Image (tube, helix red, strand yellow):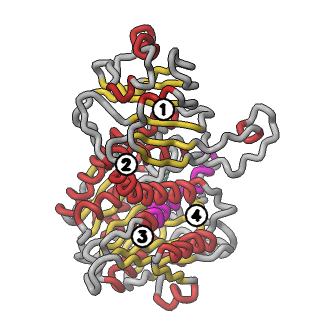
Amino acid sequence: MNPRPSIAFAKFAAPQTAANRKGTVFVLSADDGGLSDAARAYDPGKTLERAFPVAEFTGKFAGVVEILAPEGASLDRLVAIGAGKATGLDEYAWLKLGGTIAASLRKATDVAVVLDLIGASIDGKDAANLAAGILLRSYSFDKYKTSKDKDDAKADPKKPAKISIHTTDPAGAKKAFADAEAVIDGVLLARDLVNEPANILGPVEFAARAKELETLGVKVEILAEKEMKKLGMGSLLGVAQGSPRGARMAVMQWNGGKPKESPIAFVGKGVTFDTGGNSMKPASGMEDMKGDMGGAAAVTGLMHALAARKAKANVVGIIGLVENAVDGHAQRPGDIVTSMSGQTIEVLNTDAEGRLVLADALWYCNDRFQPKFMVNLATLTGAIMVALGLHYAGLFSNNDELAERLAAAGQATQERLWRMPLGAEYDKLIDSKNADMKNIGGRYGGAIIAAQFLQRFVKDTPWAHLDIAGTAMGSPSNEINQSWGSGFGVRLLDRLVRDHYES
Ligand code: BES
Ligand code: ZN
Ligand code: ZN
């Protein structure tokens, strides 16, 4: 689609300069269908407003109407975007309006957005969110498209749009956008990681991407097999042993909070490809398992966001990176492995590997950092997609306060979470005849069983598990995302940190 636009903020232009302007101008209109004076200055002949009834444009949220070369103004194009009810536009609404603008850019390079709306007072944060929405929607993963086809976009590449957002408070907008852009860059990093194919991005290459966060001031340690073996991570290493591509654990620390204050922690499943191992997956749809590191991508994107906006919090991010592949060394159903916790696990299905990776990652995190809480993210089960579809991620937690805060952050960012149960009846389903536990339960409640398994590795530390199998990849595209990898979790967790854990 579009190369990344560049964004600047400016005061409203005077009508005289507006009349001399070339390029595309976006204006907003609330559901009464009228334009503000600042917007009208670009439409002296009222061509746009006269087009509203013919185009059946009522100002409905995210509605679009455009006219070319309006009378009396030397613009190329004037576009009205519906803002719906002018009062009560929240953070997500501004992101969506930005997304709607990005979707209507076409080949425009010289773009102005007149951020004025009858009945609304628009502040710097709103302007920053609109800009963020433009960037989110403009993302596409096309680095491997080299087609020389004349009709192909690459043969006639678009130039990046220069977008000037006109607002009453450009300085405030610029300041708010610095933070918003840090978060957007984290989301786009997570999308890139999820979209990247597994031949390019294995555990070693992913670890190298995590290491790059050092340029932002994140401390990054990479544990290789030898260190993990010494630590006793038999559960994680058992998954990796069928792949020649090794295993890594990246330990990222952002210390922006008070010195010595114990950190909060995020842990991600990073299975760079999940064949299922000896319990092999069917061929159809297996390609999607390049995204089985969506949890690790979200944690890495979050660490990027927090460091780039210099969050005032101490945060640990840990990702377990393996490829679940099959060769003669691959783990077999029935194998018994010993986790770092000392607990033994009978591996009855080698495709239930994410929990085996997280068991050691969670234990290590808790043991080394004694965090205030741990939140893990994982594309863990197909069962969560059966339960919740593609619009909510599953939330499991041993702590009501943490669960409520996460759910609220989910509502605010529209990266929504639905709380699922945990309990002793489910827990006993993973008791094993031959070891302390087995890695699968019965036929029903697969997402809950997986969560129960994880809970055996967190002791009493407040913990939440987000099963993002339905939301991290392949979820329906929307106003702010058109890419297969969604970057789900970055905006959500940034919001959690921002709302509750910054000093
Ligand atoms: N990575 C998968 C879960 C998954 C499925 C993620 C579809 C995204 C889309 C996970 O490792 C897995 O294979 N889980 C099994 C568990 C089962 C063997 C108990 C599943 O969900 O079928
Ligand atoms: Zn699997
Ligand atoms: Zn998996």
Prevailing SS of the magenta stretch: helix
Tag in front: 2 or 1: 1
Q: Is residue 297 magenta?
A: yes
Circle 3/circle 4 CB separation < 8 Å = no
Circle 1/circle 3 CB separation < 8 Å = no
Circle 1/circle 4 CB separation < 8 Å = no
Check disc 3 and report the residue beneath it. 307
Q: Secondary structure at mark 1?
A: helix
Q: Secondary structure at mark 3?
A: helix
Q: CA distance from mark 3 to mark 4?
A: 24 Å
Check disc 4 and report the residue beneath it. 272
**Furthest residue in direction front, as rendered:** 16
Residue type for callout 2? Pro
Q: CA distance from mark 4 to mark 2?
A: 42 Å
Residue drawn 49% across the image and 58% down it: 185
Nearest the camera: 388 or 224?
Answer: 224
Label ID, residue 170: 2
Q: Secondary structure at mark 4?
A: strand
